[in-house]
Image (cartoon, rainbow, N blue to C red):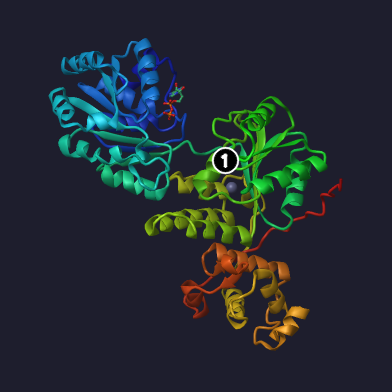
């Protein structure tokens, strides 16, 4: 009997398996279930195509995208694989023909749309033709947390009930924890082996800076590290996109804006220029990026953090497609934490969905504030494990951490004493005892927390507040101009129940970049 490697070579014309294809195929061949997490282009299809050809009986692949199904079948047929698809685009005559081939055992692999698979008469038909595996492609569609929820995917639970002994593979590129749990629950994959791989982009160097003067920091970064290179700069709002594009232009860097507020023609024109040009910077909202495949994008910068590590991975993944060294650079401050949190709060989602969104944001903040290897945190989020990478800021210049419990207590009680109505910059002034008109007016010079923080600088206290906010140990009230307030977890720190570990921020030299005024 042919082996998986024989098929890989003789039918598909590849020399060897890539990533985890081999162990996944071995697991399915042995009758086991798999949850496969690989980015798009990672080579998921072979994981069910080869076992379908080797195991007796027909492999059934559920796919939500008709066009994709047809491409797959066409490609397979050309290679001599007995494959077909069943979906709403087929006329009844052709559909009957495919069903006939199924029953006659003349197919290795059939692609089916989810709604058709779940019809009782189709399930009965399948029961007569000995399915050898079920592959559920785009399995994240089963999760209401995903970006692509499809109610008909929920009904796929019927597969595990009707065909309990037949191996099931769920495949997806969307890999966060809540989605993963939903896939396992709805598709009955409690005993599945989980395979996650291919999310690493080793040529991308990850760097994060505390935000000070973001545009000047950006300019310094481009001038020092990527002068003359093409790159993408992401900003949260249209207005900021426009501002930053003008700022870069004024400082001698060709920059194009891109956001949903521009006319279709303008967006198209800017995208074209970026794709063709050299040494151009696209300043954009997240509206930019879908299908952008420019191989020599040397850097992706975020002047505000995205909403999740998935988004960050996807957006930074547009750098260095050619495999040459590239940078992912981000700067953020307490304001950003507050804005992202309040965007969730003021959103339409129901309570449980908001909780998930907060958790996703928390995972992102943990990445931004880590003192360990950033790649380890990023890949760990996708279930992949790796040694410290040597190609991120924290690996290249290790970050010191310190026991920040006492500092945190000072910072938090300062919030309390001043009435939970001030922002981090002013609170830091109270801690170091920096007098101003405001502190005299509010008589804060008489408070017990006045000047109790002389051991740290203003900047360091701001960093403490930012880190506490990122860790959720205090709240930021956006309705009241970013006033810091205490929450339940703050009290646990104040009572000495939760120790706090903090990191020392890198020193950001923005003065290195002289900005030109127009
Ligand atoms: P996914 O479904 O994960 O997006 P595909 O299965 O479509 O990815 O594969 C992506 C590309 O990788 C395809 O062009 C495929 O031919 C190629 N590929 C898959 N496996 C191998 C392999 N073992 N060796 C070389 N190329 C491969
Ligand atoms: Zn690292």
Asked if residue 36 can be seen in this view, the reply is yes
* Residue nearer the viewer, 499 or 367: 367
Point out residue 18 in the picture as x, y percentages from the top left corner: 44, 28
Q: Nearer the viewer, residue 390 or 409?
A: 409
Let me know if residue 454 appears in the view. no
Left or right side of 318 for 109: left
Query: Looking at the image, which is closer to me, 388 or 31?
Result: 31
Q: Going by the image, does 27 lie left or right of 104? A: right
Q: Residue at x 25, y 37 (%)?
A: 156
User: Can you identify the residue that label 1 sits on?
Assistant: 315
Q: Quadrant of the N terminus?
A: top left
Left/right of residue 443 with respect to residue 171 in the rendered view? right
In the rendered image, the quadrant that contains the C terminus is: top right
Q: Which residue is at 16% across, 22% downward? A: 129
Q: Position of residue 479 (x, y in %)?
A: 57, 67
Relative to 295, is 35 above or below? below
> Which image quadrant is residue 229 in?
top right
Task: Determine if the C-beta at disc 1 is less than 8 A from ligand 1.
Answer: no
Q: Nearer the viewer, residue 29 or 272?
A: 272
SS for dot 1: helix
Residue 407 percent location from the top left of the image: 61, 75
Q: Is residue 360 above or below residue 52?
A: below
Residue 46, by quadrant, is top left
Q: Position of residue 49 (x, y in %)?
A: 33, 23
Question: Residue lying farthest front?
Answer: 263
Using the rendered view, name the quadrant where residue 484 is placed: bottom right
């Amino acid at each position: 009997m042919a082996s998986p490697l024989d098929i890989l070579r003789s039918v598909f014309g590849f020399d060897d398996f890539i990533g985890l294809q081999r162990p996944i195929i071995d697991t399915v061949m042995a009758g086991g279930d798999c949850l496969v997490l690989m980015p798009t282009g990672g080579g998921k299809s072979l994981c069910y195509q080869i076992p379908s050809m080797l195991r007796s009986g027909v492999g059934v692949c559920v796919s939500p995208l008709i066009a994709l199904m047809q491409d797959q079948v066409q490609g397979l047929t050309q290679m001599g694989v007995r494959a077909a698809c069943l979906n709403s685009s087929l006329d009844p005559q052709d559909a009957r023909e495919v069903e006939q081939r199924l029953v006659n055992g003349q197919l290795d692999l059939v692609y089916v749309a989810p709604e058709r698979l779940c019809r009782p008469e189709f399930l009965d038909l399948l029961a007569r033709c000995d399915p050898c595996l079920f592959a559920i492609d785009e399995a994240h569609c089963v999760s209401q947390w995903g970006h692509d929820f499809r109610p008909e995917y929920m009904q796929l639970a019927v597969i595990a009930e009707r065909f309990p002994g037949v191996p099931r593979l769920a495949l997806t590129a969307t890999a966060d924890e809540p989605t993963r749990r939903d896939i396992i629950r709805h598709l009955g994959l409690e005993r599945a082996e989980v395979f996650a791989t291919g999310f690493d982009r080793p040529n991308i160097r990850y760097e994060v800076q505390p935000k000070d003067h973001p545009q000047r920091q950006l300019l310094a970064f481009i001038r020092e590290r990527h002068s003359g290179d093409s790159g993408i700069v992401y900003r949260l709002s249209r207005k900021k996109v426009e501002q930053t594009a003008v700022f870069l232009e004024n400082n001698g860097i060709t920059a194009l804006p891109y956001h949903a507020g521009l006319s279709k023609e303008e967006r198209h024109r800017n995208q074209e220029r970026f794709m063709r040009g050299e040494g151009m910077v696209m300043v954009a909202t997240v509206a930019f990026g879908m299908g952008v495949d420019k191989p020599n994008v040397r850097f992706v910068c975020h002047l505000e953090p995205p909403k999740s590590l998935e988004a960050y991975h996807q957006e930074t993944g547009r750098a260095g497609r050619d495999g040459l060294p590239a940078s992912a650079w981000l700067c953020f401050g307490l304001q950003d934490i507050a804005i992202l949190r309040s965007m969730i709060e003021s959103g339409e989602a129901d309570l449980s969905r908001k909780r998930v969104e907060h958790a996703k944001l928390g995972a992102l903040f943990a990445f931004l504030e880590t003192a360990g290897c950033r790649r380890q945190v990023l890949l760990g989020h996708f279930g992949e494990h790796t040694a410290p990478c040597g190609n991120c800021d924290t690996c290249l210049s290790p970050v010191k951490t310190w026991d920040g419990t006492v500092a945190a207590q000072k910072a938090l009680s300062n919030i309390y004493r001043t009435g939970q109505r001030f922002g981090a910059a002013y609170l830091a002034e109270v801690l170091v005892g920096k007098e101003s008109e405001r502190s005299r007016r509010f008589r804060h010079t008489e408070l017990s927390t006045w000047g109790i923080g002389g051991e740290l600088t203003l900047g360091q206290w701001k960093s403490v507040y930012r880190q506490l906010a990122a860790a959720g140990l205090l709240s930021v009230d956006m309705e009241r101009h970013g006033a810091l307030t205490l929450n339940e977890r703050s009290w646990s720190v104040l009572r000495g129940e939760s120790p706090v570990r903090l990191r020392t921020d890198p020193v950001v030299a923005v003065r290195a970049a002289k900005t030109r005024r127009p």
